[in-house]
Image (cartoon, rainbow, N blue to C red):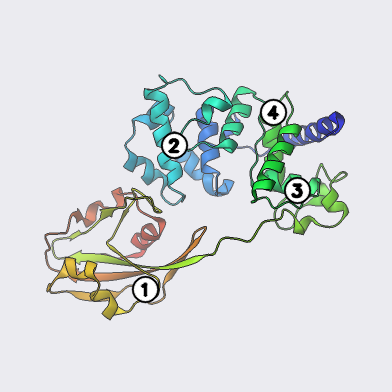
Amino acid sequence: MPFKLNMDFSNKLITWYLQNKRNLPWREEPDPYYVWLSEIMLQQTRVDQAMPYFYKFIETFPKLHDLACADENTVLKLWQGLGYYSRARNLHFSAKHIINILNGEFPNSYHKLIKLKGIGDYTASAIASICFNESKAVVDGNVYRVLSRYFNIETPINSSKGIKEFRELAQKLVPFENPGDYNQAIMELGATVCKPQNPACEICVLNDGCLALKDNKQKLLPVKENKVKITTIHLNYLVIVSTNNKLILEKRNGKGIWKHLYQFPLIESPIEIGVNEFISHPLFISIFNNSEINIQLYNEIPIRHKLTHRNLLTKFWIIRTPNNQQLNTDWNTINEFPVPILIANFLKQFKFD
C-alpha cells in the first residue's frame, strides 16, 4: 500500500474524529481502567445501552483497587441486564490479578495486556493505542465494515482468510503518531456514519475514495459466511411460594450461559412441555414428592429471549406449597442476588402474596 494512501486515509479520519467525536466519559482522560471497562462493556453492546452501566460501575468502583476488592456477586449484580456475563467475571478476575500479582501496575503494552484473562487482540490493541500510544490497530465490527467497503473487499470477515487479511490491512493503515485517535476515529465512523443499514455516505469523510460507494455495493459488504445454526431451548422455572415466605434459589455453575448467576430451579427441554410432563419430571418430584401443592402457569405464551446461537422460550410456573426443607432463600432478599435478565424482568412484574 502506498505510504501516501496510508497517510491520507488516517489523516482524514483523525481530522474528522476530532471535530465530530461523541462526548463519552471514558474519552475525557485516557485512564487505562476506564478505557478497559468501556471496551469490555461495548463488546456486543451499544453505547447508549452501556453508558448507564459504565456510570454505575465507576460510581461503585471508582478505582481499579475497588473493583479488585469487591465480591463477585456485587460485580455480577451491577452487570445484570448487560448480558454476556463472562465479560464481568473476567474483568473482575483480571482486576484482582493486576492488584495482587502485578502490584497494582496496569500493563502498559499490547503484549502485557493480552496476557490478562478476558482481553483479546481487539481490547489489548485499543488500550495500548489509546492509553499508551502504541501503534496497534483495532479490528472490530465497525472496522471490518469501513475497510471492506472502502477497499471493496469481498473476503468473508468471519473466515480465517478474512480475519488475517483485515488484520494485516488494518495494521498497515494505523499511524505511528496518534494511533489512539485513529483507532477511535475508524470505530466512530463505523458506528455513526458507515452503519450496517442506511450508511450516511453523503456526509462520509472517506466518500471520495470509497470503492463500494463507487460501485453502489455498500449493502453487500462486509461479506459473512453462513451463520451458525440457531438452537431453540424451552426453559421452565419453578417459582416456589411457600407459607413461610421461602423459595429455592440456586447458583448456576459449569460453563454455560449465566455462570454464577442465581436462578429458580430449572427444567430445560427441546420442546414445549405441558403440566403433566412438568410435574412428572425428576427435578419436580425430588422437590415436591407427595407434597401438597397448587400449580399455576404464570405466562401461557413463552417469553422469547434471543442469544447469539440460541432462542430461549421461557415459562414461569408458580408453585404454592407449605414449608419445605429444601427452601433456602427468603423472598424478601431475592433482589440482592444477581440473576439473568429473564428472571429480573419477571421479578419486576410478579406480585408475591
Q: Which residue is mark 4?
A: 179
In the image, residue 287 above or below residue 199 = below
> CA gap, disc 1 to disc 3?
45 Å
In the image, residue 297 above or below residue 209 = below
Label disc, if present, on residue 244 of the rendered structure: none
Pointers 3 and 2 in contact (C-beta within 8 Å) = no
Q: Is residue 349 left or right of residue 146?
A: left
Q: Which residue shows up at 48% across the image and 23% down it?
A: 106
Pointers 1 and 3 in contact (C-beta within 8 Å) = no
Q: Which residue is mark 2?
A: 91
In the image, residue 122 above or below residue 307 = above
Q: Which residue is mark 1?
A: 299
Q: Which residue shows up at 37% across the image and 40% down it?
A: 75
Q: Quadrant location of the N terminus?
A: top right
Q: Which residue shows up at 18% across the image and 55% down it?
A: 328
> CA gap, disc 1 to disc 4?
52 Å
Residue 170 appears at what percent x and percent y? 72, 37
Which residue is nearer to you in this view: 168 or 302?
Answer: 168
What amino acid is found at the position of numbered circle 2 in the picture? Answer: Leu
Q: Which residue is mark 3?
A: 148
Q: Secondary structure at mark 1?
A: loop
What amino acid is found at the position of numbered circle 3 in the picture? Answer: Ser
The quadrant holding residue 111 is top right
What amino acid is found at the position of numbered circle 1 in the picture? Answer: Asn
